[in-house]
Image (cartoon, rainbow, N blue to C red):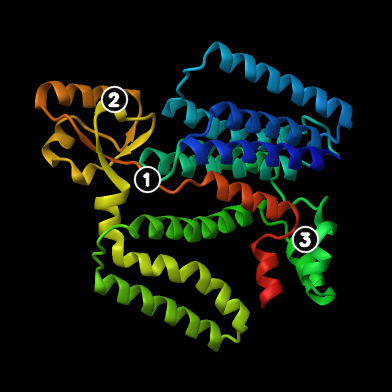
Amino acid sequence: MLELVAIAVALIGTAKAAWQDFKTSFIDEKITYSMIGAGFSLTLMNTLNAPIELALAFTAIILAAGYFFLKQYPNITPQSKHGGFFVIFLLIVPHLLKQTQAFGPNVDYGLLILSFNGAAVIFGLGWLLYKTGKLGGGDVLLYTGLQLLLPVKPHALDGIILPYVLTPDKLFQWQLLSDIGLPFFLSIFLLSTMLALLGSSIVYAWRLRKLKLKPELLSAGLGLVAVIGFAYVMNVMGASLKATAFYAIFLLPSALLLAFRKQLMDEVIVQKVTIAQVEDEDILVLDKMPQAIVKKYSLGPVLTKSEVEKLKLIVKKEKITKFPVAKVLPRLGPYVFLAVLLGVLGLDLFTIILAIA
């Protein structure tokens, strides 16, 4: 029953995040913090084998406390030290609880460790990517919340579609893979990344349609050679035509768009904007700024409030009024929601591979 609650929270949270990300390119921290809070609660309740009534009550209390805290302090901005403390807490606490047998000897500490330690790794690596402008802060928190909510593959909804997708022998193989206990986040991340790769390629191709195309033929050729080489390797390994076509659907569009990488950066993704047009956590493209200015003001790629203050100082002292900002970046929220929806129905990447093999 608690698994169904976790699935519901994950779907509702990622659906809201997806819609907001699609509309605004921003994910409200109230959504992601609520998912993280609910994940903490449900993991603890699962570990303790708590009754459903107690689990729901405890989760409701945590969510209510978080809601009123964020309402009281809406502009709170976590610092690196807070992120570091969060990671250390997630890494150490479950092991301490296990060593001290704090919850008794008959408790599933393995689930607690997998959930918390997995979230620590995801958040820690995600935070580094966020600080270098490679991943949005909302995406990092969204992934962390999903790991806490669904640390292992949920099975409550497997019977809805799965028997109609896999033959009995492949269903048996799928069950063996599921029993290995791989983190559910792994399949979500892989599938959402592949979907984002395909979706972003389509979006960028649509934006290129009205521009005078300036392809880089060498990059295009290398991309096509890579796809053809991959298809050849799959054929040698005995992969089916369906499996080869499946991967080609995702790889070919992105490989072709390599030919327009520079044009996309110059004419689509990066825009020159004023301070007033900068949005919270926009990405400043440092290699398109005068490097002397970047070094002098120690500019970072993520335009937090402190970085925007530096830009204001540059406007005042250096007379630079517009800055190169990556405004048209892939929005991961919708792809994460789709990957979670497919995953809880049993249609994760491993299932798809089995179905088309």
Image quadrant of residue 355? Answer: bottom right
220, 204: nearer the viewer: 204
- Callout 2: 10 Å neighbours few (<14), some, many (20+)? few
- Distance, label 1 to label 2, CA atoms, is 17 Å
* 139 with respect to 220 (left or right): right
Q: Which residue is mark 2?
A: 276
Label 3 residue SS: helix
Q: Locate the C terminus by quadrant.
A: bottom right
* 71 with respect to 321 (left or right): right
Q: Locate the N terminus by quadrant.
A: top right
Q: Which residue is mark 3?
A: 179
Label 2 residue SS: helix
- Distance, label 2 to label 3, CA atoms, is 53 Å
> Which sits earlier in the primary sequence, circle 1 or circle 2?
2
Mark nearer the viewer, 2 or 3: 2
Label 1 residue SS: loop
Residue drawn at x 47%, y 69% is 251
Name the spot of residue 333 as percent of width and height, x first: 54, 44
The circle drawn on residue 328 is 1
The amino acid sitting under disc 2 is Ala
> Which sits earlier in the primary sequence, circle 1 or circle 3?
3
